[in-house]
Amino acid sequence: MDVTEFEVWWKIPFRHSAGIHATRFFEGLKEKKILGVKCEKCGRVLVPPRAFCERCHAETGEWVEVKDEGIVETMTVTYMKFTGLPDPPYAVGVVKLDGADTGMLCFLGGVDLSDWRRVHEAFKPGTRVKAVWREEREGKITDIEYFKPLD
Amino acid sequence: MRVAVVGFGQTPFRTKRKDKTHPELAFEAINVALEHAGLDMKDIEAVAYGSMDPFDGIYCPERWDATACGLEKPVMKISTGGTTGMTTALAAYEHVASGLFDVAMAVCVQRVGECVDAQPVLNTAVDPIYERHSGLGAIHVAAFQATAYMAKYGATEEDLAWVSVKDHKNALKNPCAHIRMDISVEDVLNSRVVCSPLKLLECCPRSDGAAAVIFASEDVAKKVRDNPAWVVGETTISDSYYLGDRPDFADWDSLAIAGRRLFRTAGVENPVKDIDVAELYSPFTIQEILELEALGFAEKGKGKDFAKEGITFPDGEMPTNPSGGVLCTNPIGATGLVRFGEAALQVMGEAENQVDGVEVALSHAWGGTLQFHTLALLSSRKKLR
Ligand SMILES: [Zn+2]
């Protein structure tokens, strides 16, 4: 017996507030500036910035600009199409920027993504990378198009 | 207050259980658990229920499924990502451990098979302000761990593939397991790359099904069965919400902290000697390796050799996932409860793929893009020491 099935969609619009801290960060991106905040208690510079340090349960304080260069902590290249996610292949990684104590999630690019072993060689953990900025910046995280190997 | 597992029930897990609705799956698992415990629905005093709504496209599935849990009982809903199943187990356990109830049941239902693609749902679990744009789901995060671990400790693709071979061989003996096929290291290595370096046969399926575990106080447990599985330790831990805040993707520090906390309170001195089998939450091959190291079963950088050398096979020194594990069956919100129930069956000596002479079993789940861990120790002895 063929069992009856119903097709159901959840497609519901929301508007998430970024809050004041993230908004200041996004404004900085328009001017090619990457801003973080410092936790006075543990001394960590959090990038992207947040209103409080979750390790210390303390409000963060001083704003600091970090470099748009750093090192790759880890990465992966996606080769399968997932609904609503970017078209493959795309490379994402965690990059720790110079002057920051946390990693930032970002796209990696500037190299051919067809052979994953080559991409892993180009971006192996510890590799220095630099941001490639979009010409037209609108104060979004995607104003940084991707990070490319520095050399 | 000593508390024991006195019953476990699970449905066969499949890509789709089209034959049944959400509460019908709950009903099926609950009845297996009740029969296993030799109890009736009227004996259940309280229910902890776990599921993650968006995987099934049903808001408040506890409303639908409470109808299968016996009306008029206190019902509490738990939803903590991949740890949901084990957190639900601990919620039911704590109902009895508090002394407020003598018998409580944990029930989890999840129909990931009805979700056409789980990764976009997982993507909505990632920080919406800074991180979601990157197209990240659970598999990407596991791939981050694999990349970092392989670079730090020199693990090979073959080392990881052995974990999959071991889990798939185990699943062949478990009729409830979802993916049941005999595969070789070559099969794993030749399967397509999904998120590098992870390949399709290193990744879990999307499974439909339900599970239920019944807990009882000491007096009831002794009356109900002669081989209860005593809960001798449990803990949970939370790490940062932000992926970039993880200290090191090659080592699972939050799990190591939770493990030490568990072992100290339960009286475990040497994990490999004191624990006979572990049901670990490893939907991706790399994660079992990290878990073995974080929990002290393997030295750092040595976990990669365990499957290859047979140590984690059922006849090895430290068997893991004799059920076939999460790699072969993943009804996400119910998966932790299956780990817990399978660990209980090992202690009772009643598992389908029984490891010889199990007295102490560990159960683990992680959830929320590496954020949460839940751990429990079950034993045929009321106290380890
Ligand atoms: Zn701090």
Image (cartoon, coloured by chain):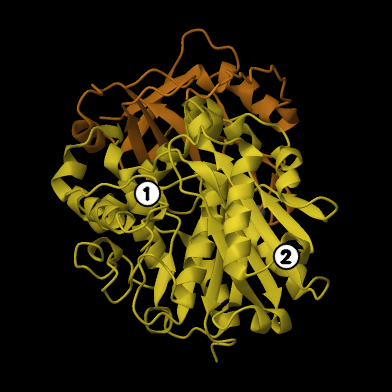
Quarter of the displayed picture in which ligand 1 can be seen: bottom right
Quarter of the image holding residue B167? bottom left
**Residue in the foreground of this view, choosing between B86 and A80:** B86
- Which quadrant does the C terminus of chain B fall into? bottom right
**Residue in the foreground of this view, choosing between A77 and A47:** A77
Q: Residue at x 47, y 9 (%)?
A: A135
**Residue in the foreground of this view, choosing between B125 and A19:** B125
Q: Which mark is first along the chain, 2 or 1? A: 2
Q: Residue at x 62, y 56 (%)?
A: B31
- Which quadrant does the N terminus of chain B fall into? bottom right
Disc 2 designates what residue? B104
Q: Chain of mark 2?
A: B
Disc 1 designates what residue? B327
Residue A138 percent coordinates (x, y):
59, 12
Instruction: Identify residue type, mark 1.
Output: Leu
Q: Residue at x 55, y 31 (%)?
A: B121
Q: Is residue A13 above or below residue B26?
A: above
Colour chain B is painted in: yellow
Residue that protrudes farthest toward the bottom in the picture: B385
